[in-house]
Image (cartoon, rainbow, N blue to C red):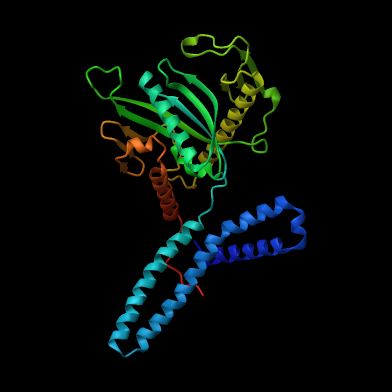
Amino acid sequence: MNILANMKKIYDLYEELGKELSSPGIISNPARMKKISKERSDLEPKIYAFDRYRTLVRQLEEARDLSREETDPEMIEMANSEIESIERELLDLDRKLRIMLLPPDPLDGKNIIMEIRAGTGGEEAALFAGDLHRMYVHFADRKGWTTELLSSTPSERGGFKEIIFSISGSDVYSHLKYESGVHRVQRVPETEASGRIHTSASSIVVMPEAEDVNIDINPSDLKIDVYRSSGPGGQSVNTTDSAVRITHIPTGMVVTCQDEKSQHKNKAKALKVLRARLLDRALCEQQNARSVARRSMVGSGDRSAKIRTYNFPQNRVTDHRINLTLHKLDSILEGDLDDLIGAARLEDQRNALEELAKEPVQQYE
């Protein structure tokens, strides 16, 4: 990674955005002014870090000159101590700059649609799917994000065979894109008289929310059926045909939605899920087509892989991708996911850096 060349481009862009913000005509275009202001503020951490790096390089050269020219042993010792301190900070800043300059995921700023499905374990898996749903809702609340239920299939004892919901807010996908995969739970079910620990699982798919500009759906490719919604056990819970089933004929994808009493709202939600699935399918195809593309362990999107185990008797959560174990299951289920998600993001960055051409720490003027 040529940090100097990349930073030159960032400085040039930063200056251009500053000039545009200072132009007289920008005030007549509030939307453009807001967009430019955000772009410029997003660049500032890189600018500040690089300025600090260049300052340290100058200080390092001065300290080395002092160490070479000084005759007083005490002054030489002070200079050498300063050199060691500056070199440590330079190494740390170099790594941070490399992470800052990694190509951004263009989807990071998007909202998401999350699908949670009960897997092996029957009713216990369905209850765990409900636990996971509440965990992510709590996490969203902590972040100031908004959640909306799109579709659900309740189980007999209050869990979910399937639940689909959206999360909207700032950089949602960048935080939750690592959650796709199989989540396993180990606990004693309430109906287990002997106290034996059962293992069950639920699977999660995280999809960036698609907009009309991302996915163009031809109405003639859709088969739309309406029917009466049903609850656990199949009993009818509505007297009107408000539930909607949409089949995307070219791909065979089927989306159902019955949670709203309005057929129009159910159709809108079903289309929202269908768009996200089609975008996700296209992204997966692109990823699989790249023969040399980066596929890190954390961000590979392998949804059949077991990524995490939630062990209730030990109050333990283990992320198997990054070998991280935390003994605070109770707080994690209340939405305290920052440690897990932060560690996954750091591992993904580390993998990305390893795949870039390794260069020695550079000296910048």
**Count of picture labels:** 0
User: Which of these two is toward me, 122 or 143?
Assistant: 143
| Residue 180 position within the rendered picture, expressed as x and y whole percent measured from the top left | 45, 35
> Does any portion of residue 90 appear in the rendered image?
yes
Tell me: 248 left or right of 365.
right
114 w.r.t. 351: above or below: above
Tell me: 201 left or right of 276.
left
75 w.r.t. 280: above or below: below
Quadrant of the rendered structure where residue 226 is?
top right
Q: Residue at x 40, y 67 (%)?
A: 89
> Which residue is outermost to the left?
194
| Residue 349 position within the rendered picture, expressed as x and y whole percent measured from the top left | 44, 51
146 w.r.t. 158: above or below: below
Q: Residue at x 44, y 77 (%)?
A: 59
> Does any portion of residue 177 appear in the rendered image?
no
150 w.r.t. 47: above or below: above
Quadrant of the rendered structure where residue 272 is?
top right
| Residue 45 position within the rendered picture, expressed as x and y whole percent measured from the top left | 53, 60
Q: Residue at x 59, y 62 (%)?
A: 10
Q: Residue at x 71, y 64 (%)?
A: 22
Quadrant of the rendered structure where residue 76 is?
bottom left
User: Which of these two is toward me, 215 or 309?
Assistant: 309
| Residue 334 position within the rendered picture, expressed as x and y whole percent measured from the top left | 40, 35
